[in-house]
């Protein structure tokens, strides 16, 4: 590494790469992300936040690689569910990676959901390994006819029918996850189903439903909590009306604190106290037996016998 001139802080390109990064989050309001990032700004890490819809880019510029790593790890803990990648990683690529890493196969229950996903996934490498692009589901005439037959008598409107189609396609095709949607005048109801039930979220059309569907799938594949406002729905049960209303993201972070929870410190103190008690007991036993710990059981037994009342003694 070349020496720096006194008083001049000039970073090489390699050093800038080591001390800067861009974290990509989805499903958390920009206000909540900024609030969490302020703690690192006080430590000397420059923080810039840019948001569009539910997606937020968080740029970190630290003075040292170690400082950057501390900030990155803390934010990864705090936003474990929302953080989907770094640098140029797209949400579509992160979703495919999650499906592939967790060996989850995806199909769509209807053409509307397929249209949302196909335009985002068709350019992602290896997407065909985890998504059928309709070949085994809604685009197959035989499968589509079976889906129509199984859901023809479903009551409760388009949303109830979409929920039933998600369950039906999972059973027919035998995949791990299925997506569905109902397009309405100003919003879209999204469904991501597993074999146990289905996640439901209503998204305003101005909030890019395709990205929300990708994020729901990514979290479902990884077993992560869904974003605030996404609800769990059992198959065969009526969908509550509030599930079908579009909600914005809360401005306050609901994630765990960036710093390690204080419970860890409390547990550490309890373990230390327990260790001290054990050592104190061992020292007392050593003193009582004159260093012969093997004689401790016999001495304790004799001590207990001496403390008991003798035969014929009167209790006062």
Image (spheres, helix red, strand yellow):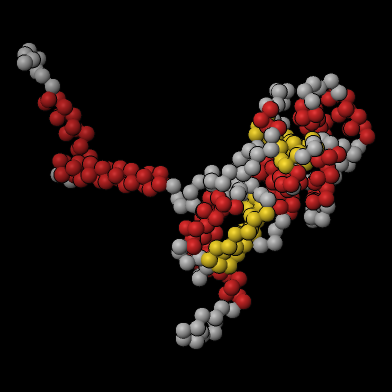
**What is the quadrant of residue 295 in the picture?**
top left
Residue 143 in sight: yes
In percent of width and height, residue 122 lies at: 83, 52
Residue at x 79% of width, y 56% of height? 125
Residue at x 52% of width, y 53% of height? 35
Q: Is residue 120 above or below residue 153?
A: below
**What is the quadrant of residue 200 in the picture?**
top right
Which one is nearer the viewer's eye here, 245 or 83? 245
Q: Residue furthest right?
A: 141
How many labels sit on residues?
0
In percent of width and height, residue 242 lies at: 66, 30
In percent of width and height, residue 135 lies at: 88, 42
Residue at x 88% of width, y 24% of height? 149
Which one is nearer the viewer's eye here, 307 or 31? 31
**What is the quadrant of residue 163 in the picture?**
top right
* Placement of the N terminus among the 4 image quadrants: bottom right
Relative horizontal placement of residue 49, taking residue 90 as reference (left or right):
left
Residue 217 in sight: no
Q: Is residue 52 above or below residue 111?
A: below
Which one is nearer the viewer's eye here, 304 or 252? 252
Relative horizontal placement of residue 70, taking residue 149 as reference (left or right):
left
């Amino acid at each position: 590494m070349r020496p720096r001139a006194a008083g001049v802080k000039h970073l090489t390109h390699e050093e800038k790469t080591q001390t800067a990064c861009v974290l990509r989050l989805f499903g958390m309001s920009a206000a909540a992300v900024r609030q969490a990032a302020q703690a690192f700004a006080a430590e000397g890490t420059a923080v810039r936040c840019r948001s569009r819809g539910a997606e937020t880019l968080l740029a970190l510029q630290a003075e040292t690689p170690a400082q950057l790593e501390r900030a990155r790890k803390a934010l990864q803990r705090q936003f474990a569910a929302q953080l989907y990648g770094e640098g140029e990683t797209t949400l579509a690529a992160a979703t495919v990676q999650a499906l592939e890493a967790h060996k989850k196969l995806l199909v769509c229950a209807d053409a509307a959901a397929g249209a949302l996903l196909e335009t985002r996934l068709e350019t992602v490498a290896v997407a065909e390994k985890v998504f059928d692009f309709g070949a085994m589901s809604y685009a197959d005439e035989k499968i589509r006819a079976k889906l129509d037959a199984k859901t023809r008598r479903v009551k409760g409107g388009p949303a109830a029918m979409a929920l039933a189609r998600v369950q039906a396609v999972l059973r027919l095709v035998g995949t791990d996850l299925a997506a569905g949607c109902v397009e309405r005048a100003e919003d879209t109801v999204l469904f991501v189903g597993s074999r146990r039930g289905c996640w439901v979220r209503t998204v305003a059309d101005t909030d890019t439903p395709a990205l929300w569907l990708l994020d729901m799938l990514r979290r479902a594949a990884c077993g992560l909590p869904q974003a605030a406002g996404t609800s769990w729905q059992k198959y065969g049960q009526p969908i509550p009306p509030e599930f079908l209303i579009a909600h914005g993201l809360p401005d306050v972070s609901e994630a765990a604190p960036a710093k390690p929870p204080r419970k860890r410190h409390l547990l550490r103190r309890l373990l230390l106290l327990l260790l001290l008690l054990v050592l104190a007991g061992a020292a007392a036993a050593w003193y009582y037996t004159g260093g012969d710990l093997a004689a401790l059981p016999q001495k304790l037994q004799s001590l207990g016998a001496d403390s008991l009342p003798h035969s014929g003694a009167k209790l006062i």
